[in-house]
Image (tube, grey):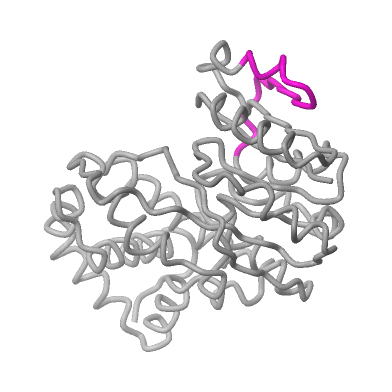
Amino acid sequence: MLSVLIPNHDYNCLALVCDLHKQLQECGRPFEILVFEDGSTHCLEENAPMEKLQDVRHIVSRENKGRYRMRYLMPAMARFPYLLCIDSDARVVRPDFIRKYLSYAAAGTGDVIVGGLAPRAETVRDAGHSLRLAYERERECRRDVKKGLSCFNYMIPAAVMRKLKEDDAFPAGYGHEDTVMGLELKHLGVKMKQIDNPLLHLGLDTNEAMLAKSVSAGRNLWHIYRSGRYPGIEGESRLLGAYLRIRRLGCCWLLAAAYKLAGRKVRENLLSAKPRMRAFDFFRLGELDKAARGGGRSSGR
């Protein structure tokens, strides 16, 4: 028995819900689909027809609670023992998508099952979204749970989800909700299993939006680390781990100087039609250092 949870903000996810609903009905098992409009002001009319589908709940909230809060709010509304959590800007690409997850649920798994991300067609090229496309192609589609949890498409036992504790002081900005959840699961001794059951990611950030999100993520990451509430977080984030090694060597001043000198050219590359992932790594490292310098002890020598 499966509860499908889809948090949504200003996105038309009707096609996703219809595809999932069709597959769930074909499997003949009890199910529910919950779509929670998290402060949406757009696409509400487009999404309204899903309310006519059996066992679908379309919940509209005027308050934008944010990605982190939704991770804990929606499971509390679910009725069934397994939770399939999916981002709203996804597309089903396999006819056996639901059946594959149900096979693990039927076996009574206590693991978190991660389905992954489907690669886009190589013909997709867009200079205005080149950074998102490059990151997806070179990093996310090759990602497995050994490199960190991705909450884009995963199934978790409800009993496991109830053991996770919401942090009321978690920063409101974008970034690292997945990192924290992956760390908490490891502390609980819960195994994460990567399977070949991907969804296509339809949402595409512009290059500028991608950089802005990366700045926010750096601030969040440093806030989470400095809070002291997540021991071992540096082992869950390669970026933070690399930065702390630089810090221990007393070389943050050198990083800051290099970022100040090369930052403009790095940004130009990341906004170009052919962004380099090493340049993106350097950008994120430089922004994390800026967050550290502005958020506590000096990260100097």
Task: Determine whether, in the image, residue 70 is placed left or right of residue 214.
Answer: right
Residue 101 position, x and y percent, is 69, 54
Residue 40 position, x and y percent, is 57, 22
- Residue drawn at x 27%, y 67% is 282
- Residue drawn at x 59%, y 51% is 153
Identify which residue, 232 or 148, lies in the foreground: 148
The mark total stands at 0
Asked whether residue 55 is drawn in magenta, I would say yes
- Residue drawn at x 32%, y 77% is 252
Task: Determine whether, in the image, residue 86 is placed left or right of residue 1.
Answer: left
Q: Is residue 48 above or below residue 109?
A: above
- Residue drawn at x 83%, y 39% is 78
- Which region shows up in magenta? 48-66
Residue 48 position, x and y percent, is 63, 14
- The quarter in which the C terminus is drawn is bottom left
Residue 164 position, x and y percent, is 79, 58
Asked whether residue 156 is drawn in magenta, I would say no
